[in-house]
Every structure is written in C-alpha cells, then in structure tokens.
C-alpha cells in the first residue's frame, strides 16, 4: 500500500470508529465498502482485528453500564442466527437476502418513528440477536437489529451492551478466519497499519458521544440504520 492509501484507510476507519464510539454501531457500515475499494486485502481479516480492538475499548469505557445478562441473551440468539444465515446463503441468492435485509430494517425504522417500543426482555434480546446474526452473515451488516431494540436506553448502557455483544461476535469471526487460514502475518500487519485510525476515532467519540447523549442518540441510531438499509437495497438496484 502507498502512503496515500494508508492515510485514506486510516481516515476511513477513524470516521467509522467515531460513529460506532458515539452510538454503539456503524463501523462496518462506514468503513468496509471504502476499505475494500482502497485495498481488498483490508477486508475481512485486518478490519475485524481492529474492530475487535474498538469494541474492547468501548466496552472498557462503558464497563459500568454493561448489563451482562442482556449481552448473554443476545449472544444466545446470534449463534443460531448466524447458522440460519449460512443456510440461507446456500438456498437463496445474496441479492434477495440483501434486499430483504434493507426492507426489514426500513420497516423497523418506520415503526420506531411512530414511537413503537418493544419490551426489553430475554425473548426480545434473543430475537434481535438472532436477526443480527442472520443479517451479519448474509449482508455483512448485523448492527441495526440490536441497535433498534436498544434505541431507548441511555447512551452509555446502549453502547456498552452493543459493544459487549459485538466483542463475542467479532471474536468468533476471527477464530473462523484463523481456522480457514485467512488470518496470518499479512493480515495482522495490515491491521496495525490502520489501527491509528481506530484509536483516533475512539478518542473523538468520547466527545461526540457526550453531545448525542443529550437526547440525540435515538435519532442518530435511526439515521444510521436507515443508511444501512438504503445501502443494502442500493446494491441490488444500481
């Protein structure tokens, strides 16, 4: 990679890390498409390495607000959700699944705009985790289902719970890459190259999160979730 490409990649990850550090998700949505254009080798291994570091940093920052049983129930849903997603990839085309993802998220955002409030309990957490695992496996964007369920929580608890949930998911993905030989010295070297962007974005998010916590977090979640859905649908239309 040239110095200009490294700078661009670090800038992209910094932007994505700022978004995720502010509202709890959004790193993949912002960073992955642009990183792939800069250098395809940055995805998925190097990206997932720095994503794990970011989620650990956010989890540590919001550690006092993490509700462990919420994370546990959501993870319980993510595992079978990922298995269902893998099965769907075999049975259905990726185009159909991506379009379905976009429509479902836009529907959820529309319902949220009418102040529809789902009760936060083990069943809703399992359901959101299952949908997150399914969408993450089929469309590479698994954050919106969990974020939409948790949108009415206070900012610190929302970010902490999402980060705890993502730590497990990213770790499992990295383990799978290592097993199939897609996580080695080259991937770790590229991860180190873009790590400064993650650190910079995380530091910036310490301030942007405070601003959003004044009553804007829910709106930011709905906007980012809508963008994720539009991107997924746009892949098939364009």
Image: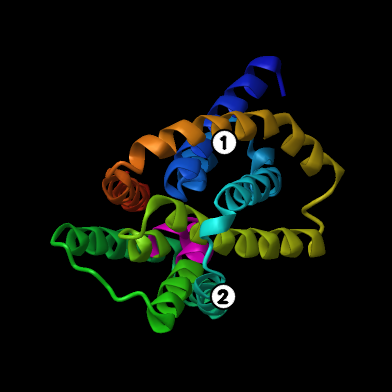
Above or below, 220 against 179 in this view is above
Residue located farthest toward the front when viewing the structure as drawn: 64
Range drawn in magenta: 135-145
Between residues 139 and 211, which one lies in front from this camera angle? 211
Left or right, 110 with respect to 165, comes to left
Q: Position of residue 38 (x, y in %)?
A: 59, 29
Q: Position of residue 108 (x, y in %)?
A: 25, 64
Name the image quarter holding residue 80: bottom right
Left or right, 88 with respect to 112, comes to right
- Confirm whether residue 13 shows in the render: no
Which dot marks residue 72? 2
Q: Earlier in the sequence, mark 2 or mark 1?
A: 2
Coloration of the structure image: rainbow
Residue drawn at x 70%, y 43% is 46
Callout 2: few (<14), some (14-19), or many (20+) C-alpha neighbours within 10 Å? some
Which dot marks residue 202? 1
Residue located farthest toward the left when viewing the structure as drawn: 114
Q: CA distance from mark 2 to mark 1?
A: 25 Å
Residue drawn at x 40%, y 51% is 155
Callout 1: few (<14), some (14-19), or many (20+) C-alpha neighbours within 10 Å? many
The quarter of the rendered structure image containing the N terminus is top right
The quarter of the rendered structure image containing the C terminus is top left
């Amino acid at each position: 990679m040239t110095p200009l490409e490294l700078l661009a990649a670090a800038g992209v990850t910094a932007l994505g890390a700022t978004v995720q550090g502010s509202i709890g998700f959004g790193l993949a949505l912002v960073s992955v498409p642009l990183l792939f254009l800069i250098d395809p080798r940055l995805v998925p291994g190097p990206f997932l390495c720095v994503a794990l570091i970011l989620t650990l940093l956010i989890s540590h920052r919001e550690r006092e607000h993490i509700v462990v049983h919420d994370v546990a129930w959501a993870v319980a849903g993510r595992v079978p959700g990922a298995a269902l997603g893998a099965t769907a990839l075999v049975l259905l085309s990726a185009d159909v699944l991506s379009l379905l993802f976009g429509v479902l998220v836009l529907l959820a955002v529309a319902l949220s705009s009418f102040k529809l409030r789902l009760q936060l309990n083990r069943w809703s957490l399992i359901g959101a985790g299952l949908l997150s695992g399914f969408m993450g496996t089929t469309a590479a964007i698994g954050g919106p289902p969990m974020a939409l369920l948790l949108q009415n929580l206070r900012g610190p608890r929302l970010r902490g719970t999402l980060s705890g949930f993502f730590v497990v998911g990213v770790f499992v993905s990295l383990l799978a890459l290592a097993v199939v030989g897609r996580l080695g010295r080259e991937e770790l070297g590229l991860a180190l190259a873009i790590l400064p962007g993650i650190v910079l974005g995380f530091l910036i998010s310490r301030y942007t999160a405070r601003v959003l916590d004044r009553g804007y977090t829910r709106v930011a979640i709905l906007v980012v979730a809508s963008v994720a859905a539009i991107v997924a649908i746009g892949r098939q239309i364009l």
